[in-house]
């Protein structure tokens, strides 16, 4: 379905009935990465799967969007659907947005799940790389990022190809601006430290993007946080181990 939020129409897919679990995908991806997992547990929860601003079937709107603006889009979806509180889960970039949401609207969180993500900021080297990626995307197309990024997302060739196609199909203006928004994000360990809701920090044991040290750093700042390293999974545990990750989410 399409939901009018702020200045854009956002695509939202709802699977199942029960307690609301709102899930935010990583950069260049869309709601489909969660579908298999959601369908496995649709009798235990109401999964609200968003296509974030500028990605999937959602509109880009203002080309200069920020992660904070994307967090306000999430709030708009909750309001339109009449969801007072939800388990909010964010994957990779979606985790950055979930933390931005938590900073402004902690009262709307029943639980927080941070999946293959971190609360830190980019290093200067990584910022420079994101700026270069954004320029290349605008000049040559989204396939530039798709080709360089997808091999790092999973050890499974089928998942690599699925994610490559998703990223390559993303509208270049939205994808480039999202790269800039990620580069400009602050660290949010202080936000994580102040939350009083249950917090899950999940990562694949084979993740080539998020090191185990980043997960451990997040767990240390809040006694309500606990970490799980998922076997046989890389940066895409919702696709690589949907039954395992889904069980963790519905149990929160």
Image: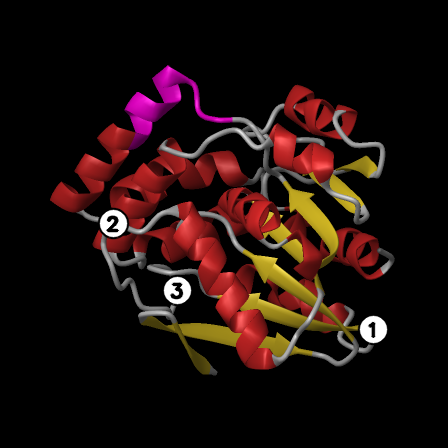
**Residue 166 location, x and y as percent?**
40, 57
Q: Quadrant of residue 88?
A: bottom right
Q: Secondary structure at mark 2?
A: loop
For the residues carrying marks 2 and 3, which lies nearer the camera in this image?
A: 2
Q: Which residue is mark 1?
A: 44
Give the magenta range: 121-130
Dominant secondary structure, magenta:
helix
Up/down of 70 relative to 35, above or below:
above
Tag 3–tag 1 contact (CB < 8 Å): no
Question: Which residue bears the numbered disc 3?
Answer: 56
Residue plotted at (75% across, 52% down): 245
Q: Percent x, y for residue 240?
A: 66, 49
Q: Is residue 5 above or below residue 27?
A: below
Q: Which residue is mark 2?
A: 64
Can you say whether 144 is above or below 50 in the image?
above
Q: In the rendered view, how is the structure colored?
A: secondary structure
N-terminal of the pair, mark 2 or mark 3, is: 3
**Mark 2 touches mark 3? (CB < 8 Å):** no
Relative horizontal placement of residue 5, taking residue 7 as reference (left or right) = right
Residue that extends furthest to the left in the rendered view of this protein: 139
Instruction: Categorize mark 1 by other alpha carbons within 10 Å: few (<14), some (14-19), many (20+).
Output: some
Q: Residue 196 lies in magenta, yes or no? A: no
Q: Is residue 125 magenta?
A: yes
* Badge number at residue 21: none
Alpha carbons under labels 3 and 1: distance apart: 26 Å
As drawn, 223 above or below 79:
above
For the question of whether residue 153 can be seen, the reply is yes
Viewed as shown, does residue 93 lie left or right of 64?
A: right
The residue under the point 66% across, 31% down is: 206
The secondary structure type at the circle numbered 3 is loop
Q: Residue at x 84, y 39 (%)?
A: 224
């Amino acid at each position: 379905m399409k939901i009018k939020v702020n200045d854009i129409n956002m695509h939202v897919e709802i699977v199942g009935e029960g307690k609301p679990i709102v899930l935010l995908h990583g950069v260049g991806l869309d709601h489909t990465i969660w579908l298999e997992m959601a369908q496995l547990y649709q009798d235990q929860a109401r999964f609200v799967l968003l296509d974030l601003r500028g990605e999937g079937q959602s509109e880009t709107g203002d080309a200069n969007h920020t992660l904070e603006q994307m967090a306000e889009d999430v709030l708009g979806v909750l309001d339109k659907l009449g969801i007072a509180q939800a388990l909010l889960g964010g994957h990779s970039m979606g985790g950055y947005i979930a933390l931005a949401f938590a900073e402004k609207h902690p009262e709307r969180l029943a639980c927080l799940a941070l999946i293959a993500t971190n609360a830190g900021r980019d290093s200067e080297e990584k910022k420079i790389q994101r700026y270069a990626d954004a320029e290349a995307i605008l000049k040559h197309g989204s396939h530039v990022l798709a080709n360089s990024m997808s091999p790092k997302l999973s050890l499974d060739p089928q998942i690599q190809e699925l994610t490559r196609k998703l990223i390559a199909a993303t509208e270049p203006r939205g994808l480039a601006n999202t790269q800039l928004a990620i580069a400009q994000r602050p660290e949010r360990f202080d936000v994580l430290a102040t939350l009083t809701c249950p917090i899950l920090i999940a990562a694949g044991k084979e993740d080539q993007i998020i090191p185990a040290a980043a997960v451990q750093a997040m767990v240390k700042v809040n006694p309500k946080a606990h970490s799980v390293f998922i076997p046989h999974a890389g940066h895409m545990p919702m696709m690589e181990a949907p039954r395992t990750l889904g069980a963790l989410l519905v149990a929160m």
